[in-house]
């Protein structure tokens, strides 16, 4: 293997976090089903909760982390990381590797993403009883001044302030991601198409990995069955939209710009 493509078995899948969304975890688990793929799921987002070597908003240097997963996945045809990094943070990878280390950005319907984002925080981010440091961090970085004219809240009203902060992410951080020149793929489209799943795998792995028909059938049988630690429920964009209360509708109108709404509609999402 030449020096130029020594690390080309590495790939990344970015997103604005998966927050317990079954289809995000499904995609990673589906990739790991192939014996020649070894894939992390938000590893560098989970570690700060337990090892506290940095803040939750920080990630290791992208190029150093690439060398790390290149080493730990050396015996695999493809090794990657899903959801640890954000699309607007990936330029150093492009500058260093060009097309040798490939990556895509997975997006989700904003109403569905917002549901899981809010729920993840309202359920204490899977930290367990008595452990609140990650949630305390979230509270401390909320831009409370932005929400002063909306429904008031206290620290315990996580479902309110997390909803507001999620809208801010949709309006700002996710727009920064979607402005990046990369493959932005709707997760719903992969869920609906084994062909698109296969094309995505082929792209990320430089055509080195192919799923056979029986394995594809297996992983697609998991779409509506929760994995260990997940609850069984199904959320649709339409059900979310019709269930929003007045304070939520007011918050959407105030926080989410028309430009952001237009961008989601360009992706084919109905709002």
Image (cartoon, grey):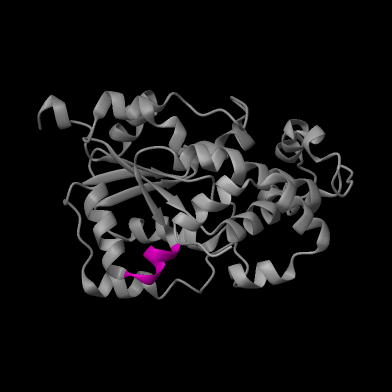
At 81% across and 33% down in the image, what residue appears? 145
Taking the spot 80% from the left edge, 51% from the top edge, the residue there is 160
Could you say which is closer to the camera, residue 110 or residue 1? 110
Q: x and y percent of residue 139 in the render?
A: 77, 37
Residue 35 visible in the displayed image: no
> Where 180 sits versus 229, above or below?
above
Q: Residue at x 53, y 45 (%)?
A: 16
Q: In this orientation, which residue lies closer to the viewer: 128 or 61?
A: 61
Question: Could you tell whether 169 is left or right of 206 in the image?
Answer: right
Q: Residue 94, located in which quarter of the rendered image? A: top left
Q: Which residues are magenta?
A: 188-193
User: In the image, is 232 to the left or to the right of 175?
Assistant: right
Residue found at the very far left of the displayed protein: 2
Instruction: Identify the residue shown where x is 37% and y is 63%.
Output: 190
The residue nearer to you, when weighing 94 against 42, is 94
Quarter of the rendering containing residue 138: top right
**Which x, y percent locates residue 196?**
29, 63
Q: Horizontal and vertical percent for residue 24?
A: 48, 57
Q: Does residue 229 belong to the magenta stretch?
A: no
Location of residue 262 in the rendering, given as x and y in whole percent from the top left corner? 53, 52
Q: Is residue 3 above or below residue 237?
A: above
Question: Dividing the image into 4 quarters, which one contains the N terminus?
Answer: top left
Overall secondary structure of the magenta stretch? Answer: helix
């Amino acid at each position: 293997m030449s020096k130029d493509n020594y690390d080309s078995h590495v790939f990344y899948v970015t997103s604005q976090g998966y927050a317990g969304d079954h289809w995000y975890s499904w995609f990673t688990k589906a990739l790991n089903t192939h014996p020649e793929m070894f894939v992390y799921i938000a590893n560098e987002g989970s570690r700060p909760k337990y090892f506290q070597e940095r803040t939750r908003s920080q990630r290791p240097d992208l190029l150093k982390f690439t060398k790390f997963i290149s080493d730990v996945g050396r015996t695999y045809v493809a090794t990657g990381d899903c959801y640890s990094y954000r699309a607007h943070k990936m330029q150093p990878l492009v500058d260093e590797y060009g097309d040798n280390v490939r990556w895509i950005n997975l997006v989700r319907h904003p109403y569905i993403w917002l549901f899981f984002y809010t729920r993840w925080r309202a359920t204490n981010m899977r930290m367990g009883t008595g452990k609140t440091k990650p949630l305390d961090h979230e509270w401390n970085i909320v831009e409370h001044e932005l929400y002063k004219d909306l429904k008031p809240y206290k620290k315990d009203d996580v479902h309110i302030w997390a909803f507001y902060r999620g809208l801010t992410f949709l309006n700002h951080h996710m727009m920064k991601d979607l402005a990046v020149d990369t493959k932005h793929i709707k997760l719903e489209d992969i869920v609906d198409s084994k062909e698109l799943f296969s094309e995505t795998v082929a792209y990320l792995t430089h055509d080195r990995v192919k799923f056979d028909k029986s394995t594809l059938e297996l992983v697609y049988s998991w779409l509506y069955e929760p994995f260990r630690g997940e609850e069984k429920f199904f959320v649709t964009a339409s059900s979310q939209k019709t269930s929003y209360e007045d304070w939520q509708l007011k918050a959407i109108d105030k926080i989410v710009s028309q430009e952001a709404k237009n961008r989601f509609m360009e992706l084919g999402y109905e709002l």
